[in-house]
Amino acid sequence: MPKTVLVVDNDFFFVEFLAELLESRAYNVIKAYDGKEAISKIDDENIDLMFVDIVMPKIDGTELIKFVRMKYPENCFSIVAVSGTIIERIDTLSNIGADYYIAKGPMEKMAANINELLDNIDNNSFDKSQGAKIVESGNLFPRREAIDLLDSIQFHKAIIECVGFGIVNIDLDARIIGINSSALNILNKTTIELLNRPVTDIFPHEDRSKLINTIKNFIHNSESSEAVYTTIIDSKKIRVVVTLLTVEKKNIGLILALEDCDKWEEQA
């Protein structure tokens, strides 16, 4: 029976390149173009192997890999991280959690390296106790621009984690695509329970209409961009600030800021 491979990358042409290579080896290929779509595919399919780009919009490769490792802690399928920034991340790859890493480069070189990697995976030739396998596609060197980009991404992620209140990032279809540790603590939930779930799931039934009406108001009223109300979650009084997320005047989603009112009242 052919193995099923999930290919995740926001670059359409790279997905097609990799899918063609895998199908030539008789793999069954499932395609996803960001981490959010990949989570849906994982829920619906039995995956044997995953190729995933690290830098992607919405849910990126690092978050997707963490999600998969948490969802399948005992028996996770093998994960191959593919990125144009592998070399720049060489000292921190262990934090990503993939089994294999392939640096993007010339397609011909990549095809040969991927085929060799797949041969070794199929034959169980790698000793995972020695750590993750890194495959370079040609003579690559760290680039200052890529290092600066990665530093900027990590800086902004650190701000979201350290801001002091819960942050929930909502996509335009009202599904959760990001959540910081403070929000997880406030909601007493795990990433597995929330990522790619409808945002209404985190609210009690009697308060879900508030959020739905707020979202509808944002969509139909361009002058409305923020709403504030309180709700009760697990016997805790939570202040909710809903803000429209815009980039270059384009609406791309929502941000929920959650504050545990009981916590601040106790400290006061």
Image (cartoon, rainbow, N blue to C red):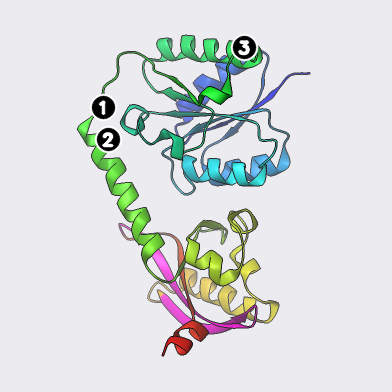
Q: Residues within 10 Å of mark 1 (few under 14, many from 20)?
A: few
> Counting residues from the N terminus, which is met first, the one under dot 3 or under dot 2?
3
Classify mark 3: residues with Cα within 10 Å, few (<14), some (14-19) or many (20+).
few
Question: How many labels, in total?
Answer: 3
- The image quadrant of residue 86 is top left
Instruction: Return the residue at label 3.
Output: 24
Q: Which residue in the rendered view is the most extreme toward the front?
A: 129
Residues at marks 1 and 2 touching, judged by CB atoms closer than 8 Å:
yes
Which quarter of the rendered picture does the N terminus lie within?
A: top right
At horizontal 58% and vertical 80% (from top left) the residue drawn is: 210
Please tell me which residue is depicted at 60% across the width and 42% down the height of the picture.
Answer: 69
Q: Secondary structure at mark 1?
A: loop
Left or right of residue 24, residue 216 in this image: left
**Amino acid type assigned to the residue bearing label 1 in the image:** Pro
Q: Are marks 3 and 2 in contact (CB under 8 Å)?
A: no
Identified by mark 3, the residue type is Ser
Residue in view at x 23 percent, y 29 percent: 143
Residue linked to disc 2: 146
